[in-house]
Amino acid sequence: MLWCWVYGSWRRSVWDKYTALRGSCVGAGVFLDYALRFIGQHAVLDISELPLKPQADDWAFVFQGRNTITSLRGAPGLPWRVSEIDVRWETHLTTAIPIGHWQGKGAWAVSVPEDSISATEQLSGNLYSLLGRVDDAIFHAHGRAYQLLHWRDTHRYCGRCGSATDLVEDGRAVLCGGCGLRVYPRVSPCVIVLVSKGDKMLLAAAAGFQKRFYSTLAGFMEPGETCEAAVIREVREEVGIEVGNVRYFASQPWPFPSQVMLGFFAEWQSGELTPNPDEIEDADWFEVDAMPPTPPNASISGQLISDFIERR
């Protein structure tokens, strides 16, 4: 059976480009593969300048609570046009939050009512479900949209005097109308570390998860703490060993709801594994040819693990 996934003017431009090269009759999987590559060429969200007012051909990243809402007829993760938001949800776009520019157009975060989703037209799913299924840039755009919606929802009133707040600075902050307190979006830094002991890596299963998999250790930084000190402390608290030679790897925005993950490598120095039962169900040293279930490479934990394996 041959068919295609379609999506407004965007689908026509991609389809025309593709069929000009391959003919007019292609399978859905082939078209989608090309479509996602096309998206990836232009999908980095530019946050250096924010749009001032929603336009009909702007993009809208739509959420219902914690769930991202996309079209069943579009490619996974593809945002809506603002004109579609008006028709489908009759949402007051005055509450939309500017998040940047995407594919040369303004991009907005929009929240819709919980009872407004049509199961025959829209797909509602947890943001985490997009991880690894869509281009990283699109996932991070959805993540930024959710972080800003969550920030606005939790800062409708001033934390100091209780008065209502309003968006200011083109949406980059909220301002209290009573006492003048200005609050910017919160980002919580976390360290995540792969600890090695020779050719083995330390992986742990978190306590309280029904579907167990093994990951690298992670935790929030404390006020006044360096990243390196946070790595050493978190490893000590979670599994009772001492580490050194802490080396930075990479970072990743983690919108669950507002973290940034700072990835590190470290080396075992002393001690025996003693998992903290409040946080860790199991922890062990693993060789690369005897790995347990681990996170996908779309996550920074998966990237740390893959990098360690590739260097063996």
Image (spheres, rainbow, N blue to C red):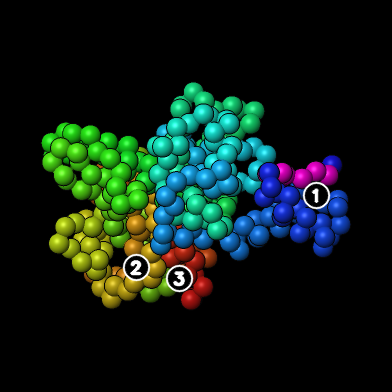
Instruction: Kindly report the distance in space between the C-alpha atoms of the residues bearing marks 1 and 3.
Output: 38 Å
Q: Which mark is residue 264?
A: 2
Q: Which residue is mark 3?
A: 308
Circle 2 packing at 10 Å, graded few (<14), some (14-19), many (20+), is many
**What residue is at 57 percent from the left and 39 percent from the top?**
83
| Residue range highlighted in magenta | 2-7
Q: Earlier in the sequence, mark 1 or mark 3?
A: 1
- For residue 143, side relative to residue 11 (left or right): left
From what the image shows, is residue 230 above or below residue 2?
A: below
Q: Amino acid at mark 1?
A: Gly
Q: Which residue is mark 1?
A: 27
**What residue is at 34 percent from the left and 68 percent from the top?**
264
**Place of residue 272 in the rendered image (x, y in percent of width and height, measured from the top left):** 26, 62
**What residue is at 40 percent from the left and 37 percent from the top?**
95
Q: Is residue 5 magenta?
A: yes
Q: Amino acid at mark 3?
A: Phe
Circle 3 packing at 10 Å, graded few (<14), some (14-19), many (20+), is some
From what the image shows, is residue 22 above or below residue 172?
A: below
- For the residue pair 175 and 195, the one nearer the viewer reads as 175
